[in-house]
Image (cartoon, rainbow, N blue to C red):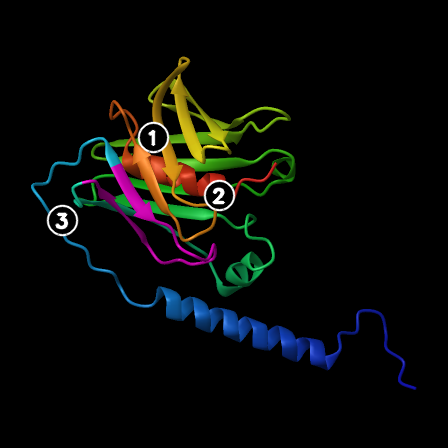
């Protein structure tokens, strides 16, 4: 009989873990390979409504491209990882390493969102947001506000105003309110990815890029 010491890991387990890792990296590379080239269509007007088709796998780093209802290219949002270990961990903990990046069609607006992983963030979800636009940079924090029997999921400051975000599960919508008034909303055409995500900025106060990033944040939200 062979005696195994404390901390011993069977060789077969290491082989299985290695195979899973290689398959995961290979599939992810195949799904995200290649650079997507997109050119603007139409007359350049963007309006108040836009849409994109989300990635079918949460760990995919492929850009999801946003278009307005006239098929003008608006920009993209994508998920990023610092190293292969984070990608592997995402298979088991999809909401732990969350970094999102977005850029509009002209490169004039860029957004980066990073989920904090400090001890206190185990009890409350928080994300750091950096928005860079022409001659302006804005940094703020998104705070998870999910409570029992409440539809509110998070809030964030934007241009010196507090934006509250709520979720209507039955209607599959995400609603954005300021001072008690709805200013934007997001809806989807299904329950499972890949879905088409529709955004309506209503008065144009919140840019499509920010709405898309917030929607992706909510996908990784955990109470």
The image's mark for residue 40 is 3
Which residues are the magenta region? Answer: 50-69
- Depth order, front residue of 140/183: 183
Residue 120 appearing in the image: yes
As helix, strand or loop, the secondary structure at mark 3 comes to loop
32 versus 78 height, above or below: below
Residue 68 lies in the magenta-colored region: yes
Cα separation between marks 3 and 2: 28 Å
**Sequence-earlier tag: 1 or 2:** 1
Give the class, few, some or many, for how many residues have Cα within 10 Å of label 3's Cα (few <14, many ≥20).
Answer: few
The image's mark for residue 138 is 1
30 versus 86 height, above or below: below
Cα separation between marks 1 and 2: 23 Å
The residue that disc 2 covers is: 219
- Depth order, front residue of 133/221: 221
Residue 131 lies, in percent from the top left, at 33, 35
Residue 189 lies, in percent from the top left, at 38, 43
Q: Quadrant of residue 88?
A: bottom right
Q: Are marks 1 and 2 in contact (CB under 8 Å)?
A: no
Cα separation between marks 3 and 1: 27 Å
The residue positioned farthest toward the top in the image shown: 179
Residue 161 lies in the magenta-colored region: no
């Amino acid at each position: 009989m062979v005696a195994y010491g404390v901390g011993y890991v069977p060789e077969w387990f290491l082989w299985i873990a290695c195979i899973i890792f290689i398959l995961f990296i290979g599939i992810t590379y195949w799904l995200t390979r290649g650079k997507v080239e997109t050119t603007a269509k139409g007359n350049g007007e963007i309006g108040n409504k836009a849409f994109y088709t989300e990635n079918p796998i949460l760990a995919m780093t492929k850009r999801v491209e946003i278009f307005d209802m006239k098929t003008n290219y608006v920009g993209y949002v994508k998920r990023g990882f610092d190293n292969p270990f984070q990608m592997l961990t995402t298979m088991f903990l999809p909401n732990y390493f969350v970094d999102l990046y977005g850029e509009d069609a002209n490169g004039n607006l860029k957004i980066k969102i990073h989920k904090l992983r400090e001890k206190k963030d185990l009890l409350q979800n928080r994300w750091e947001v950096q928005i860079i636009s022409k001659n302006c940079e804005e940094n703020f924090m998104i705070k998870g506000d999910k409570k029992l029997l409440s539809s509110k999921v998070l809030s964030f400051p934007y241009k010196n105003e507090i934006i509250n975000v709520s979720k209507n599960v039955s209607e599959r919508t995400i609603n954005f309110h300021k001072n008690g008034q709805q200013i934007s909303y997001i809806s989807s055409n299904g329950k499972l990815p890949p879905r088409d995500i529709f955004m309506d900025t209503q008065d144009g106060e919140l840019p499509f890029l920010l709405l898309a990033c917030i929607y992706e944040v909510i996908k990784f939200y955990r109470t």
